[in-house]
C-alpha cells in the first residue's frame, strides 16, 4: 500500500472510532459533568441530547439547522432566551457562573425550556461534554 | 389574516416579542415546524435590526393559505449600500448591540437564507423596508 493511502486509511479508522465514541447524553449526566444546577425544566432531567454548540454570538446560533441541541453560552441576557426560542433550542447551559434574572427565567419557563447553570468556563464545559461523547454540530 | 406589531428602537427587552407572537400563531395554524423556524428566524433577525438601528418600526404580516408575507418598515438611518450590507461580516452595529450577541454582520444574509423572496428598499436618513415571502 502506498504511504499516502495508508495514512488516509488510518485517518478513516480514526474517524470511525470517533463516530463510535459519540453518544447522546442525559441532562442529569450533563449536570454531573459540569457541576451544573437545573434552574428550570426539572422534568427534562432524563431527556437525552444529541449535540452541543458553544457560542456567545447569537447571530451564529440563528444560522443553525440542528435539532436536539444543547446551547452552551456565557452570554446571559434576554436575547439568549429569545434566540433559543426562535431557533427551537430547548436546552441551555449558562457557564462562568452567570445567573438568570427574573425576566429571563419567566421567558424560559413560558417556552418550556430546560436551563442549567455551571460554574465552569465555556472552554472547560465544552471540553468535558465533547470528551464524554456529545456530538459537535460541525 | 393580517397582523401588525410595533417595534420600539433601542428596546432590547422587547426585541423578539412580535416574532414570538407570530411563531405561536403559525403553530396554532398547523404550519410545518421547519417552515415556521425559517419564517421566525428571518423575522427575528429583521426585528433585531430595527431595534438595533432604527427609531421605530412596524411589522405587517399577511398570512394566506400557501404563503406568509412579512413587511418590516422602519424610520431610521437607512442603509447606504444594500449590497454591501448583504455581505457576511459587514456591520455598523454599536457596542451595545454586540454586547447583546448580535452585530456580526450576519443578519441580512441569514434573512436571505431563510426566506423564499426578499426585497430591501432603503433611503438614507429616512428608513428601510424589508419584504419577505415564505411559501408553506
Image (cartoon, grey):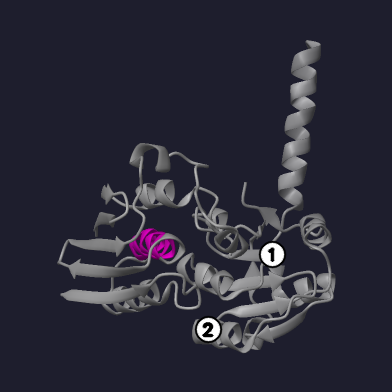
Spot the residue most to the top: A2
Query: In the rendered image of this protein, does residue A55 appear above or below residue B92?
Result: below
Residue A97 in the magenta stretch? The answer is: no
> Can you identify the residue that label 2 sits on?
A107
Q: Residue A70: horizontal and vertical position, in percent?
A: 64, 65
Q: Chain of mark 2?
A: A
Residue B44 in the magenta stretch? The answer is: yes
Q: Residue A60: horizontal and vertical position, in percent?
A: 56, 53
> Can you identify the residue that label 1 sits on?
A72
Cβ–Cβ under 8 Å for marks 1 and 2? no
Q: Nearer the viewer, residue B88 or A62?
A: B88
Q: CA distance from mark 1 to mark 2?
A: 18 Å
Which quadrant holds residue B14? bottom left
- Name the front one of labels 1 and 2: 2
Q: Chain of mark 1?
A: A
Secondary structure beneath dot 1 equals strand
- Crowding around mark 1 (Cα neighbors within 10 Å: few <14, some 14 to 19, many 20+) is many
Question: Range of the magenta residues?
Answer: B34-50
Q: Residue B123: horizontal and vertical position, in percent?
A: 27, 49
Counting residues from the start of the chain, the first of labels 1 and 2 encountered is: 1
Q: Residue A61: horizontal and vertical position, in percent?
A: 56, 58
Amino acid at each position: 500500500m502506498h504511504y499516502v493511502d495508508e495514512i488516509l486509511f488510518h485517518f478513516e479508522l480514526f474517524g470511525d472510532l470517533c463516530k463510535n465514541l459519540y453518544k447522546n447524553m442525559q441532562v442529569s449526566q450533563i449536570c454531573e459533568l459540569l457541576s451544573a444546577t437545573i434552574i428550570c425544566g426539572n422534568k427534562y432531567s432524563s431527556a437525552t441530547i444529541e449535540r452541543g454548540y458553544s457560542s456567545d454570538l447569537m447571530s451564529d446560533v440563528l444560522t443553525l439547522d440542528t435539532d436536539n441541541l444543547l446551547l452552551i453560552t456565557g452570554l446571559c441576557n434576554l436575547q439568549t432566551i429569545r434566540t433559543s426560542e426562535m431557533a427551537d433550542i430547548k436546552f441551555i447551559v449558562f457557564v462562568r457562573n452567570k445567573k438568570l434574572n427574573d425576566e429571563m427565567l419567566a421567558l424560559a419557563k413560558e417556552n418550556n425550556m430546560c436551563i442549567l447553570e455551571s460554574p465552569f468556563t465555556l472552554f472547560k464545559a465544552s471540553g468535558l461534554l465533547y470528551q464524554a461523547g456529545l456530538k459537535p454540530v460541525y | 389574516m393580517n397582523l401588525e406589531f410595533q417595534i420600539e428602537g433601542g428596546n432590547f427587552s422587547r426585541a423578539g416579542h412580535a416574532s414570538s407572537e407570530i411563531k405561536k400563531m403559525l403553530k396554532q395554524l398547523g404550519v410545518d415546524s421547519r417552515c415556521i423556524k425559517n419564517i421566525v428566524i428571518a423575522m427575528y433577525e429583521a426585528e433585531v435590526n430595527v431595534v438595533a438601528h432604527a427609531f421605530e418600526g412596524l411589522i405587517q404580516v399577511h398570512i394566506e393559505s400557501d404563503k406568509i408575507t412579512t413587511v418590516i418598515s422602519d424610520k431610521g438611518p437607512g442603509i447606504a449600500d444594500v449590497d454591501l450590507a448583504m455581505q457576511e461580516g459587514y456591520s455598523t452595529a454599536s457596542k451595545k448591540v454586540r454586547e447583546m450577541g448580535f452585530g456580526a454582520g450576519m443578519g441580512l444574509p441569514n434573512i436571505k437564507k431563510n426566506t423564499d423572496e426578499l426585497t430591501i428598499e432603503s433611503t438614507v436618513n429616512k428608513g428601510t423596508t424589508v419584504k419577505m415571502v415564505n411559501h408553506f
